[in-house]
Image (cartoon, rainbow, N blue to C red):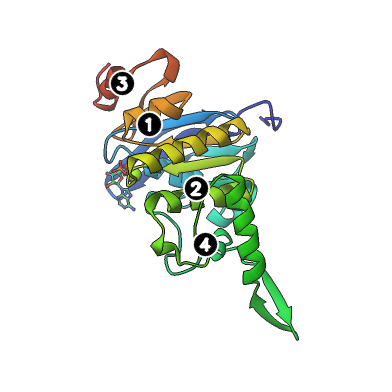
Amino acid sequence: MTTPAGNGPILEAESLDKKFGGIHAVQGVSLHVMPGEVVALAGDNGAGKSTVIKMISGVYRPDGGEVRYQGQRVDQLTPRQIRDHGIETIYQDLALADNLDVGTNLFLGREKIKKLLGIPYLDRKTMRSEAAKALKNLGIVVRDLDAPVRTLSGGQRQALAIGRAVYWQAKLLIMDEPTAALGVPEQREVLALIHRLKASGVGIIFISHNLHDIFAVSDRIVVLERGRKAGERLASETDGDEVVKLMMGGV
Ligand SMILES: Nc1ncnc2c1ncn2[C@@H]1O[C@H](COP(=O)(O)OP(=O)(O)OP(=O)(O)O)[C@@H](O)[C@H]1O
Ligand SMILES: [Mg+2]
């Protein structure tokens, strides 16, 4: 089956399965994301959320099941190939290089190279001005673009990671606990950015433990419990109590 881009789901994961030795981390989990839709992946610690998204972003090969992106199978691709297709992932342990500046981080893995007398060098000037434009478009304020990323606040780092996804025109953005380590104003900023991306048609998978955040941004909620899908609800048709019960294996 092929899905014409634009109409059908941007992403379909079907019956995903992953074992780590004796641990069946993910069992038969299916989910889909429509363009402009935010799907929350909820579940207790160890429920299998990060493992599911790592199968979608190419970090792990599924032991069973398949992942289709715009109708095309992508579950045998490398993380780099997946990114080049337009799926950006912001991992729980933020994939930014701490000692590099903001511009260089925006281009991490896809650095702009120029040549002088045949000798390649990093085009920092272009990367810096492109980064400044990209962040400004998103309303992200970073005072010093030359500062190493480790000097940024948690919220700025998240914003930069989101900025990177936008700059490279991701069609699907996967965010694993993007607000977990942030202060309240920074959490709000990240949630506002999610709303802006959604409005521009980007599909988003949002992992969080925080029910308030989940209900603030998501259209649909998929609940995992010990590796299995415990349920799926429209955010408008459920509430925190029901989601918690699903997370605990009730309902
Ligand atoms: N690389 C790995 N090797 C062995 N076991 C793993 C590995 N990654 C995950 N697991 C196990 O798989 C299960 C699911 O882990 P996963 O990280 O997907 O959970 P999670 O829902 O993201 O949890 P959290 O909310 O704490 O981030 C856990 O039992 C975990 O210990
Ligand atoms: Mg996790």
Mark drawn on residue 213 = 1
Give the residue at mark 4.
Answer: 102
> In x, y percent, where is residue 136?
59, 49
Left or right: residue 135 compared with residue 23 = right
Which amino acid type is shown beneath numbered disc 1?
Answer: Asp
Q: Are marks 3 and 2 in contact (CB under 8 Å)?
A: no
Mark drawn on residue 89 = 2
State yes or no: Cβ of the residue under disc 3 lies below 8 Å from any atom of ligand 1.
no
**Rounded to the nearest whole Å, what is the CA distance between mark 3 and mark 1?**
11 Å
- First in sequence: mark 3 or mark 2? 2
Q: Are marks 3 and 1 in contact (CB under 8 Å)?
A: no
> In x, y percent, where is residue 40?
43, 31
- Counting other residues with Cα less than 10 Å from the Cα at mark 4, is it few (<14), some (14-19), or many (20 or more)? many
**Location of residue 145 with respect to 21 vertically, above or below:** below
**Rounded to the nearest whole Å, what is the CA distance between mark 3 and mark 2?**
26 Å
**Rounded to the nearest whole Å, what is the CA distance between mark 1 and mark 4?**
27 Å
State yes or no: Cβ of the residue under disc 2 lies below 8 Å from any atom of ligand 2.
no
**Rounded to the nearest whole Å, what is the CA distance between mark 2 and mark 4?**
18 Å
Give the residue at mark 3.
Answer: 240
Q: Residue at x 60, y 29 (%)?
A: 9
What element does badge 2 sit on? strand
Q: Residue at x 65, y 72 (%)?
A: 123
Left or right: residue 250 compared with residue 116 = left
